[in-house]
Amino acid sequence: MKQNYIFFDLDGTLTESGPGIVNSVRYALKRWGIEEPSDAALLRFIGPPLVYSFSTFYGFSQEDAVKAMSVYREYYAVHGIFENGVYEGIPELLGALKDAGKHLCVATGKPEKFMFPILKRYDLLQYFDFCGGSDEAETHADKTTVIRYVMDGCGARADDVVMVGDRHHDIDGAKANGVTSAGILYGYGDRAELEAAGADYIAETVDDLKRLLLG
């Protein structure tokens, strides 16, 4: 690819964050007397903002969804934040991209309060020129806003950016900003979701993504 700026989603793209998010959502739902036995149902929370997810998937009012986000973070801030791991091959991919002269950025809907400790914990921060997430209240957690924020932060033009992510939210945000999108299948989305969103490219594995980005 000719683009010099590569933006990466965090959850489901750089890190396998499902366990921590699932456990945190389950913890919050129990506060409302909801027992959710299905991990698959809770994996839907990976990608969209939390308030949206509690409202959409469980019918919470706006007020309760905001409260549920706070309860979620009671668990996440202590335990869930590090109940994850880096996907195999990601450090090598990032290193190869840096060696090729690419500018790497993180564009995540996760609050920066949690984003930076995760990147530091797994020694990923060293690869990135700019890392952008949402504020703690998630008032700008949608991917359209996040990608624009990161573009402004690193000074990148839309035609010089590729957004890499595993969910349709990443593709939607890329399209809204006129950015090329690359969906990946090793995360928490699937091919049907990414194709329906109109991903410009789809990579099945980390190695496929490396070949795509480096040609």
Image (cartoon, rainbow, N blue to C red):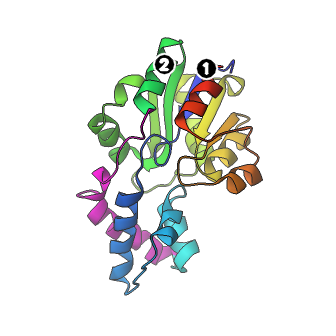
Residue 194 is situated, as x and y percent measured from the top left of the image, at 69, 50
The foreground one among 12 and 75 is 12
Task: Tell me, yes or no, whether the two marked residues, 1 and 2, touch with CB atoms within 8 Å.
Answer: yes
Can residue 75 be found in the magenta stretch?
yes
Residue 165's tag is none
117 sits left or right of 97 in the view: left
Q: CA distance from mark 1 to mark 2?
A: 8 Å
Q: Secondary structure at mark 1?
A: helix
> Does residue 129 appear in the picture of this structure?
no
18 sits left or right of 195 in the view: left
Can residue 130 be found in the magenta stretch?
no
Which residue in the protein does label 2 denote? 96
> What stretch of residues is rendered in magenta?
62-89
Residue 59 is situated, as x and y percent measured from the top left of the image, at 55, 80
Instruction: Characterize the local packing of mark 2: few (<14), some (14-19) or many (20 or more) Cα atoms within 10 angstroms.
Output: some
92 sits left or right of 52 in the view: left
Residue type marked 1: Leu
Residue at left offset 33%, top offset 70%: 71
Instruction: Tell me the chief SS of the magenta region.
Output: helix
Vertical placement of 139 versus 8: above or below?
Answer: below
Instruction: Characterize the local packing of mark 1: few (<14), some (14-19) or many (20 or more) Cα atoms within 10 angstroms.
Output: some
Residue type marked 2: Ala
Which residue in the protein does label 1 denote? 214
The quadrant holding residue 158 is top right
The quadrant holding residue 21 is bottom left
The foreground one among 214 and 129 is 214
The foreground one among 162 and 16 is 16
Residue 186 is situated, as x and y percent measured from the top left of the image, at 54, 46
